[in-house]
Image (tube, rainbow, N blue to C red):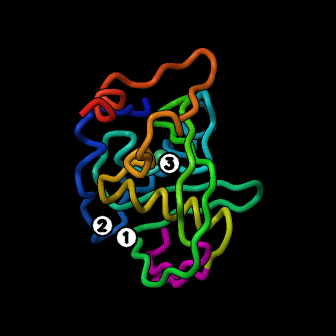
């Protein structure tokens, strides 16, 4: 699957909640993991809207910890810290984002079971970033000054994103 990049309106839609986990969803999840692995640059998380499917689901993979999160809701946030983020939909671009240090997330897993997760640190950051995608929010929305963004060699700031700072 192709990862949709900054400027495409699908990234700004509020994702639909998932009611039942059918074969299409399982196939989508498989493809999303494959996409995350083969994409250049590689990512640690991918939300369904990033592959053009506006439903409330994301996958993540951090070292040997991977999973699928459906209909996530962050019900508690504690503390705050600033950390560098990037996004497969804004390839090669990085910037500092303030996130809660600890969160509690309610969601369902791929078996349809309700889960509540208490997370902190980097994993909490990834879950906040991916949950934002399901609400049409990108990490660059939090950047106030264009100089705070770092663009890796070989990449360019998307024109639409550059425009936002000129407004
Ligand atoms: Zn992202």
Residue 21: x and y in percent read: 37, 66
Residue 132: within the magenta?
no
Q: Are dots 2 and 1 in contact, CB under 8 Å?
A: yes
Measure how far apart labels 2 and 1 are at the Cα level.
7 Å
Comparing 103 with 68, the one in front is: 103
Q: Quadrant of residue 71?
A: bottom left
Write down the region rendered in magenta: 101-118
Residue 107 falls left or right of residue 164: right
Name the disc covering residue 53, or none: none
- Disc 2 C-beta below 8 A from ligand 1: no
Rounded to the nearest angstrom, the CA distance separating label 3 from label 1 is 14 Å
Q: Is mark 3 within 8 Å of ligand 1?
A: yes
State the predominant SS element of the stretch in magenta.
strand
- Of the 4 image quadrants, the one containing the C terminus is top left
The residue under label 3 is: 46
Regarding residue 28, the answer to whether it shows in the image is: no
Tell which of 64 and 145 is nearer to you: 145
Foreground of the two, 97 or 37: 97
Q: Which residue, given by chain and number where applicable, does mark 2 sit on?
A: 18
Counting from the top left corner in percent of width and height, residue 121 is at 68, 68
Location of residue 12 in the rendering, given as x and y in whole percent from the top left corner: 26, 47
Give the labeled residue for mark 1.
Answer: 71
Could you say which quadrant of the image residue 5 lies in?
top left
Q: Alpha carbon of mark 2 to alpha carbon of mark 3: how far?
A: 17 Å
Q: Give the number of marks.
A: 3
Find numbered disc 2 in the image and state the secondary structure of the residue it sits on.
Answer: loop
Q: Disc 3 on helix, strand or loop?
A: strand
Q: Earlier in the sequence, mark 2 or mark 1?
A: 2
Mark 2 near mark 3, Cβ–Cβ under 8 Å? no
Question: Residue 160 lies in what quarter of the image?
Answer: top left
Q: In the image, what residue occupies the spot 49% across and 42% down?
A: 31
């Amino acid at each position: 699957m192709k990862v949709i990049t900054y400027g495409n309106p699908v990234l700004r839609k509020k994702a639909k909640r998932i009611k039942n986990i059918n074969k299409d969803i399982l196939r989508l999840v498989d493809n999303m993991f494959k996409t995350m692995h083969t994409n250049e640059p590689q990512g640690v998380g991918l939300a369904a809207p990033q592959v053009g499917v506006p439903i409330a689901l994301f996958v993540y993979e951090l070292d040997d910890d991977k999973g699928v999160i459906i209909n996530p809701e962050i019900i508690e946030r504690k503390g705050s810290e600033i950390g560098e983020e990037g996004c497969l939909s804004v390839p090669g671009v990085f910037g500092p984002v303030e996130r809660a240090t600890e969160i509690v997330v309610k969601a369902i897993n791929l078996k349809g079971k309700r889960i509540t997760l208490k997370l902190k640190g980097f994993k909490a950051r990834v879950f906040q970033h991916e949950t934002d995608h399901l609400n049409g929010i990108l990490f660059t929305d939090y950047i106030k000054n264009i100089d705070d963004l770092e663009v890796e060699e070989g990449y360019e700031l998307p024109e639409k994103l550059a425009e936002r700072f000129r407004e």
